[in-house]
């Protein structure tokens, strides 16, 4: 039996509704018939491609990828006009069930960490909306790489002194979170908000985080 001491989370897409935040910022620059989900998927694909080029501050990723997306969709944005995305992040909101789920984990005496592909100052804006402060936060700025590279998990293990066996990682991306965390030996919970086909082998799958505290109790007993 391996009790669960730490629960680590991706932030954007898992705790914070980043797809709505991104599309809310981009849609006013596009035509009225633009499909929100298709726009989010196009942005996600372009961001992943950009991040493969190497590490940049995430505010620069938001700016440069946001402008690339808008230009690719023929939006009237000037060559030197900034993307609306960096300034919009402060308004991105958590999914409705998230604050209560995080409080329940903290009340259950479990440590909470966030492992995010953003900058420290941007993550701090979102932490203020979560209802609790995580016990530890690891950003791309801290480890100089983006998930799915293993730097976030290695930095987490160094700073927390946690064991892989007593940690569960929770995320909404199979590419960024489920595959790399499982590859390192972590138990994983995939937050499948869109009914995706499984391309990885998470320990458990949930639709949202409402059931997560009870699920962590279950995993702690197995």
Image (cartoon, rainbow, N blue to C red):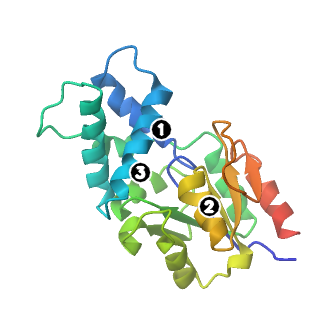
Q: State the separation of the CA atoms marked 1 and 3.
A: 14 Å
Residue 11, position in %: x, y? 52, 54
Asked if marks 1 and 3 touch (Cβ < 8 Å), the reply is no
Residue 86, position in %: x, y? 29, 46
Mark 2 crowdedness (10 Å alpha carbons): few <14, some 14-19, many ≥20: some
Q: What residue sits 73% from the left and 70% below the top?
A: 109
Is residue 27 among what the camera can see?
A: yes
Residue 61, position in %: x, y? 30, 52
Picture quadrant of residue 67: top left
Q: What number is the disc on residue 179?
A: 2
Mark 1 crowdedness (10 Å alpha carbons): few <14, some 14-19, many ≥20: some
Q: What residue sits 64% from the left and 81% below the top?
A: 162
Q: Label 3 belongs to which residue? A: 48
Helix, strand or loop for disc 2: helix
Helix, strand or loop for disc 3: helix
Q: Is residue 3 left or right of residue 186?
A: right
Q: Is residue 141 left or right of residue 108?
A: left
Q: Label 1 belongs to which residue? A: 19
Residue 16, position in %: x, y? 52, 46
Asked if marks 2 and 3 touch (Cβ < 8 Å), the reply is no
């Amino acid at each position: 039996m391996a009790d669960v001491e730490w629960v680590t989370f991706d932030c954007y897409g898992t705790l914070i509704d980043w797809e709505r935040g991104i599309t809310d910022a981009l849609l006013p620059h596009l035509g009225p018939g633009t499909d929100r989900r298709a726009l989010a998927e196009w942005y996600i694909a372009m961001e992943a491609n950009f991040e493969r080029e190497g590490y940049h501050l995430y505010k620069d990723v938001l700016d440069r990828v946001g402008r690339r997306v808008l230009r690719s969709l023929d939006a009237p944005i000037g060559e030197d006009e900034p993307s609306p995305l960096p300034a919009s992040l402060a308004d991105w909101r958590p999914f409705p069930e998230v604050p209560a789920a995080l409080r329940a984990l903290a009340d259950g005496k479990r440590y909470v960490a966030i492992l995010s592909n953003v900058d420290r100052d941007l993550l701090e804006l979102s932490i203020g909306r979560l209802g609790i402060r995580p016990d530890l936060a690891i950003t791309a700025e801290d480890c100089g790489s983006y998930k799915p590279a293993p730097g976030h998990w290695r930095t987490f293990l160094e700073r927390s002194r946690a064991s892989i066996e007593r940690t569960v990682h929770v995320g909404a991306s199979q590419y960024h979170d489920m595959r790399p965390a499982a590859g390192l030996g972590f138990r994983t919970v995939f937050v499948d908000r869109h009914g995706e086909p499984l391309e990885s082998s998470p320990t458990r799958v949930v639709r949202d985080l409402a059931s997560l505290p009870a699920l962590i109790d279950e995993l702690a007993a197995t």
